[in-house]
Amino acid sequence: MRGVQFMFNSEEGAYWILFASEPIILAYDKIRKTTITAASSFTGILRIAYIPVEIASDTSTFSSTGLRRLIYHAGVYPTGGDVSWEFHSQTSGSTKGKSTNATTSSRHAIVHFSFGTRSMTDDSLRPKNQETGLLMLALPHHIQNLPKSMQLSQKRFDLTYSCIKGPLTPTVGSVWSLDEPLLDLAFDTPAPELDPGVRQTILDQVKQDISRVLPTNDENVYGYGKQVARLAQLVHIANELGTIQSQEAEYAGDRLVEKGKDLLFSYLENFLTSRVADFLLFDTNLGGLVSKNGIVDKSADFGNGR
């Protein structure tokens, strides 16, 4: 087969379309029926798009608006990108740059993703054209902040793509500008009003859990860190719930906080003074912190030690 566009389908019913910047000769393995190879070496650009099954029975007519869009935009491909942002303040206008921090008076930030693109036909940098430019799929949280003018409707793009985050929306354009609200967040949200019985039940459970599954000095850095973080969360819960009038004073929130803080101090001190088996080192070759286990075995600590 010789050409620049090919349609493939697999045994499980998946369809794919392949675009090549130059004519290419492909050979199909008719015996095993599992591989397609190029007849000779190829220098150029190859792009492959997955075609959802809803048009599988109609691919011969190319009546799908989504398939026609994929073909139309196949020649423009991304090569990289730059990120910039600006903060809009209620009091001082906007601040633009790449390293500015938002202040408490800021309410919105506009984040610009500018994608560099090239053309498969002339390999030159492309202008940022909204109509014939870069076609990509946006996640649901992107679509909340992208202008409608960039989004393709179901009528203009009838293919449906989805992922674990939800439905994906086709967009056209090489600059994404996301307008994000900046909320006033503190370290904690206000503690809800709880029924005294519910609050006491939670504290009773914290009292039990605060002495369970505690770190051991021979544990790896990954497990040690998880158990210390778990203990810190229990102390945090007790601190949020506060002191409860109880027949047994040891159940009170403030007693649990003090006990938990003493435990945390002990475990953190052991870790930061290397009185644990898997302690931290600074490695001059890697230029950063590693664990004792990680420097010997890159798979140790689930890869987190190097």
Image (spheres, rainbow, N blue to C red):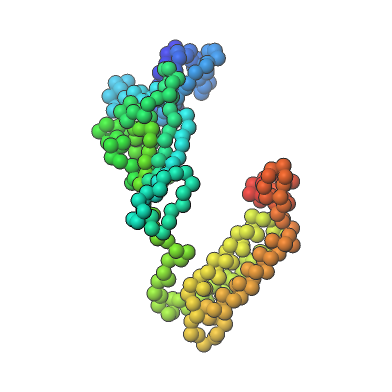
Q: In the picture provided, is 116 more to the left or to the right than 218?
A: left
Q: In the picture provided, is 257 more to the left or to the right than 73?
A: right
- The residue at the far left in this view is 155
Q: Where, quadrant-wise, is the N terminus in this rendering? A: top left
Place of residue 122 in the rendered image (x, y in percent of width and height, measured from the top left):
43, 17
Q: Quadrant of residue 106?
A: bottom left
Asked if one can make out residue 116 in the rendered structure from this viewpoint, the answer is yes
User: What residue is drawn where x is 60% and y is 59%?
Assistant: 226
Seen in the picture, residue 288 relative to 105 is either above or below; the reply is above
User: What residue is drawn where x is 31% and y is 36%?
Assistant: 150
User: What residue is drawn where x is 27% and y is 31%?
Assistant: 156
245 or 173: which is nearer to us?
173
8 or 186: which is nearer to us?
186
Number of numbered discs: 0
Q: Quadrant of residue 216?
A: bottom right
Place of residue 273 in the rendered image (x, y in percent of width and height, measured from the top left):
72, 62
Place of residue 294 in the rendered image (x, y in percent of width and height, measured from the top left):
70, 48
- The residue at the far front in this view is 92
Asked if one can make out residue 54 in the rendered structure from this viewpoint, the answer is no
Seen in the picture, residue 197 relative to 102 is either above or below; the reply is below
193 or 62: which is nearer to us?
193
Seen in the picture, residue 235 relative to 127 is either above or below; the reply is below
Place of residue 225 in the rendered image (x, y in percent of width and height, measured from the top left):
62, 59
User: What residue is drawn where x is 49% and y is 46%?
Assistant: 99
